[in-house]
Image (cartoon, helix red, strand yellow):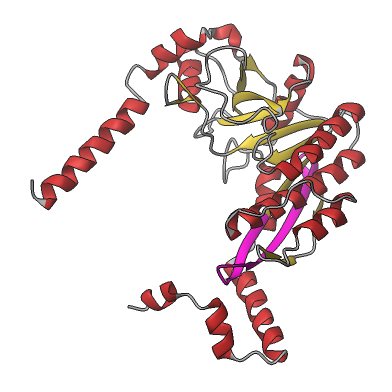
Amino acid sequence: MDRQQAYFGNIARIAGRIRAYAPPDLIERFAAVSGFDHSSYRRCTPAFDGTITAVDGSNALLLDAGSFAIAAIRAVECSYAGGECIHRRTTPLQVVSVGGADDDYAELFEECFGCRPRALPGGEDPAAAASVIRDTFEYWVALELAWELSEGDLLVLDGALRVSHASHHEILEDLLNVCNHRGVLLAAVTKRTSLTWGNGHPILPAAAGLAAKLGVGEPWYVKIPADQAIPDRQQQHTWQQRGSQYVALLHRRAARPFKIELPEYLEDEMADRAFSALAAYADDGRVTGYPYPLLDAHLHCRIGIDVAEQVRHDLIRGICGLGMSMKEYSGLFGDYHDEFNRY
């Protein structure tokens, strides 16, 4: 077999695998496995009389020495009521070291929550460690908001109600407890999910396809029961997963549904209120079907190339002021990939 035959053979193999993940009878298979019918899907009215507040964070690696790295991190909250933005707050841009003996994580964690973390990022690569610190900032902002919001308001997180690092376990528990105690609704919206059923079939297009076949009107949501055999497996440890999982299509013109998680303790009436709130704020023409307070938070927290370059130049100026030469700097942070990319 020559190279061209091998290449197109690989293309055909992978194309076949993709088709197998989403076969022509995907909807029929999902209906048989899930047992869902028209009554399984709940309609929600796009209306909300409270405040909806979204939290998102961003991180960017600035310098990477291999043994340690420097990152910039910040988080944003955007609050809306009556369809209008009522305020927007951003944490100061934090420049932190990740990895190495002088990792900033423990100090930042204690500054946010008043206690030392029970685990450090440690073995993670710099990008993963920076993501852990970003999540820490997001949880800190969310916990502060849980005490500020009123009963019946909705707090929206980007991602899922599960932790990616052991140090966040108690923090997420605190957030859930405060929201439960104060009657603040909590939801996490996932743009992309690995949740599957039937040995690898993606759950979002299956649930949406079945809803369309059954004639369910948008917006709708459906709960994915954890005690049934719909999900392929428990994809996280129990200490990681803290929410009930739903699939929701929040607008009739939405391109695709989302996986949304709500606290396990939430009753059906409050789940209806949460989804009605999300649907009420999902009619932005830029990304129709996605809650635009969360889009607003994402747009205002991201650390763009211009900001990253400015901070990087400020760092270089600072270390040069301490007597480090550019040769020493290049020896520490130089990357041969940058050289390769010149050719």
Residue 263 seen in this snapshot: yes
Q: Is residue 291 magenta?
A: no
User: Residue at horizontal 91%, vertical 27%?
Assistant: 181
Question: Residue 216: percent from the left, percent from the top?
Answer: 54, 15
Q: Nearer the viewer, residue 227 or 55?
A: 227
Q: Nearer the viewer, residue 59 or 267?
A: 59
Residue appearing at x 87%, y 45% in the figure: 144
Q: Quadrant of residue 200?
A: top left
Residue 52 visible to the viewer: no
Q: Residue at x 17, y 44 (%)?
A: 8
Horizontal arrangement in the rendering, residue 335 relative to residue 115 (left or right): left
Residue 145 found in image quarter: top right
Which stretch is magenta?
Answer: 58-84
- Measured along the vertical axis of the image, is residue 7 above or below residue 270? below
Q: Does 312 sit above or below residue 118?
A: below
Q: Position of residue 278 (x, y in %)?
A: 70, 32
Q: Quadrant of the N terminus?
A: top left
